[in-house]
Image: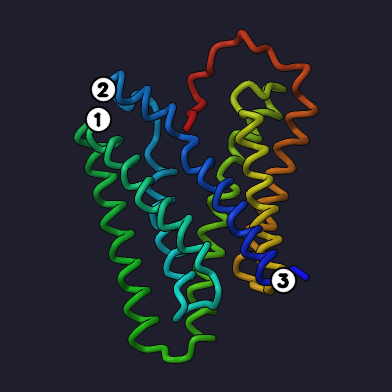
């Protein structure tokens, strides 16, 4: 008989693969930036925010914070370093003003992260309390990340077009949320289950919108000036 831990490990590995694909999805954007030697109208916000999100989840997955979450550490550790690469490329090809904003944002994240680690490790000895504090912080960041496509979804409804909401990315977001929710339910972890459950709902909403507005989409239209693809 296959035990629950083995099934959970398998689900976690699948989650790592899907999350890996999501982390790699901005690659075409950075190829464009590299070829143009300019960030054009692209924004660094998603990549800068994801650095802190991955760092917090990597911290959460450590054995002195939560139990049996090595697979959470592996994928978020990978995401952390990849997002640093993305942000570095963005920094290199940005204007002086954008570089200043990126630097200030990264500095604020480093200070916040070090402050959380210091407080949790120095003042809190109980693992359960550590798990509670870091878990709540991770929930907040993960929810913000999963619901960042809301602006695109609003644009889809307004324009009745899904041209700039890629189907595969929406599907990957849905599957990612679903897989990690399953992972959390197999060994109850509300801090992983809650944000990823909401992420699955967000991904499902995108897929429903895709189904509703696919036929009304004019695929030869140019990208509106107020849309920023990431």
- Distance, label 2 to label 3, CA atoms, is 50 Å
How crowded pointer 1 is (Cα within 10 Å; few <14, some 14-19, many 20+) is rated as some
Q: Judge left or right: residue 167 versus residue 87.
A: right
Q: Judge left or right: residue 70 versus residue 153.
A: left
Q: Position of residue 195 (x, y in %)?
A: 62, 60
Q: Which residue is mark 1?
A: 93
Q: Which residue is mark 3?
A: 4
Q: Which residue is mark 2?
A: 37
| Placement of 83 over or under 121, stated as above or below | above
- Distance, label 2 to label 1, CA atoms, is 6 Å
Q: Position of residue 150 (x, y in %)?
A: 62, 41
Q: Position of residue 188 (x, y in %)?
A: 68, 74
The answer to whether the residues at label 2 and label 1 have Cβ atoms under 8 Å apart is yes
Q: Secondary structure at mark 2?
A: loop
| Placement of 209 over or under 7, stated as above or below | above
* Identity of the residue drawn at 23% across and 40% down: 99
């Amino acid at each position: 008989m296959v035990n629950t831990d083995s099934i959970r490990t398998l689900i976690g590995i699948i989650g790592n693969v899907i999350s890996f694909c999501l982390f790699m999805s901005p690659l075409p954007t950075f190829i464009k930036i590299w070829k143009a030697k300019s960030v054009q109208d692209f924004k660094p916000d998603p990549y800068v925010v994801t650095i802190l999100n991955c760092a917090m989840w990597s911290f959460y997955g450590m054995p002195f914070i939560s139990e049996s979450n090595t697979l959470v550490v592996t994928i978020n550790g990978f995401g952390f370093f990849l997002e640093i690469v993305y942000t570095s490329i963005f920094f290199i090809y940005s204007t002086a003003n954008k570089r200043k904003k990126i630097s200030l944002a990264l500095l604020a994240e480093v200070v916040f992260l070090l402050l959380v680690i210091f407080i949790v490790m120095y003042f809190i000895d109980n693992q359960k309390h550590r798990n509670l504090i870091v878990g709540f912080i991770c929930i907040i960041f993960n929810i913000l990340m999963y619901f960042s496509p809301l602006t695109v979804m609003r644009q889809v409804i307004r324009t009745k077009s899904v041209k700039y909401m890629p189907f595969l990315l929406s599907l990957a977001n849905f599957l990612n949320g679903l897989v990690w929710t399953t992972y959390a339910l197999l060994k109850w972890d509300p801090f992983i289950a809650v944000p990823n459950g909401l992420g699955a709902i967000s991904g499902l909403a995108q897929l429903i919108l895709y189904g509703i507005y696919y036929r009304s989409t004019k695929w030869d239209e140019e990208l509106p000036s107020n849309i920023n693809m990431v």
